[in-house]
Image (spheres, helix red, strand yellow):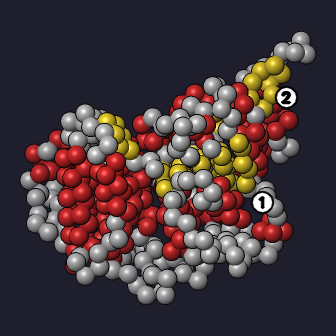
């Protein structure tokens, strides 16, 4: 790979990719030296513990951003996998593991008539003559997660786009972006329900939690999102549903589930995920700055790749900025420990990085591209295919090519564009 250090002073967007992190004097990365960039920081995942071949993308996407969209045709097990991930947080054979619904899982069916947040978060009722807050299921589950903060809690919004997400989920979409990693390692957010000195608020906090410490926290600081809360929306794209705006897609990780194994689930009652530890799902980093210094070489490699891809998006509404940059870095770094194949053989370091870059490209860039042939040009998709294929090959090496999900999706999108309109969503 040739070095283009001068680009760091010439190209304005490359400079912005490094905003908020250490200044970069030169970018020179050789594939043979990739190991030196992160070998001291990687803790290999025990392959006997987690069946990561099937579940690694879900686990690392959640760790990078605890807001995940699962898209796919009906019946592919989108909501089931959320339940099974929640189940895998418990010891196999335990009461929680064998329960129909583990206590750290809740599924809420989205209704087509939802146009505000009252069904999810609650509302103030005055039917009794006095204001009374009627909590929604989302708020109740938030309190439950706070009561057991050491266990990841999964909230599944089933058929999430049956109603306009921007309307009924506006508060969450705003607050999720306030996540911050503090100096003590804790992760906090703004309140999703501000505290109030009124009687209805104190009655509310008393009704949703019996834990004195949690109730005191709510009364003093408002009700914020707990660090162990994971929100997953299942998505069907048909004539009965709403499409997602870029506001939603920018805030979520998106994974397609269209492959079907007709033999799956016939020999075992529960998914063979293995025990998932808290730290496998809940990350201590929420921004690029949280991982950049300790993984500088890997992050620089990811930034060079993202800059090359973003250059092809210049002049389109699909160009990405800081939020996507941060999630690129987090996803790549969170995938570094998954450096073995299913037989336990060590994978080449370049392959591990290229695989993660390919997946996050599909999740965060391709998912935003849609429109007719006046908005999405065939040349745009062709140029993206070329730069992605070239950069991934440089990183992984010709001996270990990545089975690219991004290139497969771009090929599909090009075929759809021939009929006048294309979209990431099948």
Whole-Å distance between the Cαs marked 1 and 2? 28 Å
Residue 71 image position (x, y, % from top left): 53, 51
Q: Nearer the viewer, residue 423 or 221?
A: 423
The answer to which of marks 1 and 2 sits earlier in the sequence is 1
Is 106 situated above or below 55?
Answer: above
Of discs 1 and 2, which sits in the foreground?
Answer: 1
User: Is residue 67 among the parts visible in the rendering?
Assistant: no
Instruction: Give left or right: position of 214 versus 21.
Output: right
Viewport quadrant of the N terminus: bottom left
Instruction: Give left or right: position of 208 versus 73.
Output: right
Instruction: Give left or right: position of 59 versus 148.
Output: left
Q: Nearer the viewer, residue 410 or 64?
A: 410
Density class for disc 1 (Cα within 10 Å; few <14, some 14-19, many ≥20) is many
Is 54 situated above or below 79?
Answer: below
Is 179 situated above or below 401?
Answer: above
The quadrant where residue 207 appears: top right
**Which residue appears at 25% of the width and 33% of the height?**
374
Q: Which residue is mark 1?
A: 102
Name the residue at the top extreme.
129
Residue 243 image position (x, y, % from top left): 49, 37
The quadrant where residue 328 appears: bottom left
Residue 200's disc is none
User: Is residue 265 among the parts visible in the rendering?
Assistant: yes
Q: Secondary structure at mark 2?
A: helix
Instruction: Give left or right: position of 285 versus 234.
Output: left
Q: Which residue is mark 2?
A: 203
Residue 285 image position (x, y, % from top left): 48, 55
Density class for disc 2 (Cα within 10 Å; few <14, some 14-19, many ≥20) is few
Q: Secondary structure at mark 1?
A: loop
**Which residue appears at 81% of the width and 72% of the height?**
94
Q: Nearer the viewer, residue 263 or 110?
A: 263
């Amino acid at each position: 790979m040739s070095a283009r250090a001068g680009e760091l002073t010439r190209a304005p967007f490359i400079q912005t990719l490094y905003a908020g992190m250490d200044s970069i004097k030169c970018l020179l990365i050789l594939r043979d030296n990739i190991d030196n960039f992160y070998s001291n920081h990687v803790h290999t995942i025990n392959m006997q513990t987690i069946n990561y071949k099937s579940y690694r993308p879900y686990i690392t996407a959640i760790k990078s951003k605890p807001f995940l969209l699962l898209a796919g045709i009906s019946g592919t097990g989108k909501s089931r996998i959320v339940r099974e991930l929640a189940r895998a947080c418990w010891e196999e054979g335990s009461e929680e593991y064998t329960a129909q619904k583990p206590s750290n899982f809740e599924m809420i069916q989205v209704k087509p008539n939802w146009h505000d947040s009252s069904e999810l978060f609650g509302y103030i009722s005055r039917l009794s003559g006095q204001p009374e807050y009627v909590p929604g299921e989302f708020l109740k589950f938030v309190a439950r997660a706070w009561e057991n903060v050491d266990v990841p809690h999964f909230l599944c919004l089933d058929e999430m786009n049956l109603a306009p997400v921007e309307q009924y989920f506006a508060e969450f979409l705003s607050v999720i972006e306030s996540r911050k990693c503090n100096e003590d390692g804790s992760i906090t957010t703004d309140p999703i329900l501000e505290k109030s000195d009124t009687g209805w608020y104190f009655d509310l906090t008393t009704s949703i939690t019996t834990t004195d410490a949690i109730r005191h926290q709510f009364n003093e600081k408002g009700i914020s999102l707990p660090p162990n809360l994971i929100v997953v929306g299942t998505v069907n794209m048909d004539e009965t549903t709403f499409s997602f705006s870029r506001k939603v897609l920018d805030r979520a990780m998106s994974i397609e589930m269209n492959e079907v194994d007709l033999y799956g689930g016939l020999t075992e009652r529960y998914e063979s995920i293995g025990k998932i530890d808290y730290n496998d799902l809940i990350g201590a980093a929420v921004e690029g700055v949280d991982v950049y210094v300790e993984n500088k070489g890997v992050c620089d490699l990811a930034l060079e790749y993202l800059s090359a891809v973003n250059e092809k998006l210049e002049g389109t509404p699909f160009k990405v900025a800081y939020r996507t940059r941060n999630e690129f870095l987090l996803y790549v770094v969170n995938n570094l420990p998954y450096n073995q194949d299913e037989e336990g053989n060590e994978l080449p370091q370049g392959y591990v990085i290229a695989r993660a870059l390919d997946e996050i490209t599909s999740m965060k860039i391709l998912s935003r591209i849609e429109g007719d042939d006046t908005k999405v040009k065939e040349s745009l998709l062709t140029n993206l295919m070329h730069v992605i294929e070239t950069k991934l090959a440089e990183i992984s090496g010709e001996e270990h090519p990545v089975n690219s999900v991004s290139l497969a999706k771009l090929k599909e999108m090009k075929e759809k564009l021939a009929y006048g309109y294309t979209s990431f969503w099948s």
